[in-house]
Amino acid sequence: MGRATARRVDPTYYPETDHMGEGLLHRLVSELLRTLVASWLAERKVRACVGANQFIYYREHAPTVSVAPDVYVLPGVDPNLTFSSWKTWERGVVPSFAFECVSEDWLKDYRDGPPKYGELGTAELVIFDPEHAASPKERVRWQMWRRVARRGLVQVLATNDDRVRSKVLGCWLRAMGEDDELRVRLASGVRGETVLPTDAERAEAAERALARMRAERDVR
């Protein structure tokens, strides 16, 4: 009988956080979008894990080579799975969708992000710049990057429109609100005219419907 081969242990230390802070607007945009994407996929019975701000490593023994998307989708992965970081060579899955909200170091986000996601193998990358108007000749509200056969990840759209359509998610991403109230929402329809409600908005709508039912019952 042949001897069982012991699994090789990787001694490399892969950090789980960089201890770098982020602006409040950046965090609020990302937190809301993550919950909306998770709800959207769950409603459509799409099995996927939707995460945010965790290191995704895609080159073994290279702990400095990673991305940490503000929002990402891991297709086919248990939506309730918990983990500290994701190593693609162990899991065999790369994000199908990644969203990046541009930080104060906007030039770094513009320059460094797409090549990394290209090497990672991401199918679709959306870069949202909430402060694009600060440098209108150099910056743009939305960048859409998609993987194209034999070309890799390429930019297919750069626009200052208020919305773009994600092929991977099957819906629109819309910039809504101004200044500190700016958020990225999901929307459906031919042109993204129907905005997906948040959990709070669903609860408010349910309360209003219940109040109407009670009022109608009292009238009778």
Image (tube, helix red, strand yellow):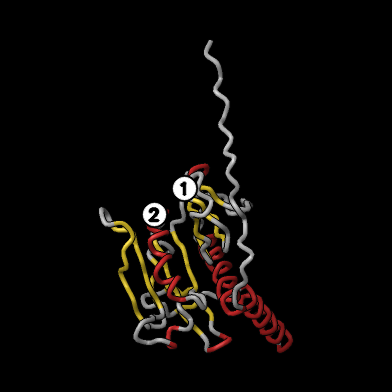
Q: Amino acid at mark 2?
A: Glu
Tell me which amino acid carries mark 1. Answer: Arg
Q: Residue at x 46, y 76 (%)?
A: 106
Left or right of residue 204, residue 127 in this image: left
Q: Between 25 and 193, which is closer to the camera in this rendering?
A: 25
Instruction: Say which label, 2 or 1, has the lower sequence index.
Output: 1
Question: Helix, strand, or loop for circle 2?
Answer: helix
Indicate whether 180 appears above or below 94.
below
Residue 110: x and y in percent read 41, 72
Q: Position of residue 119 (x, y in %)?
A: 39, 54
Residue in front for this viewpoint, 91 or 45: 91
Q: Which residue is mark 1?
A: 59
Q: Residue at x 54, y 23 (%)?
A: 5
Residue sitting farthest toward the right? 218
Of residues 206 and 59, the one nearer the viewer is: 59
Q: Are marks 2 and 1 in contact (CB under 8 Å)?
A: yes
Using the rendered image of the protein, determine whether residue 162 is visible from the camera's viewpoint: yes
64 vs 138: above or below: above
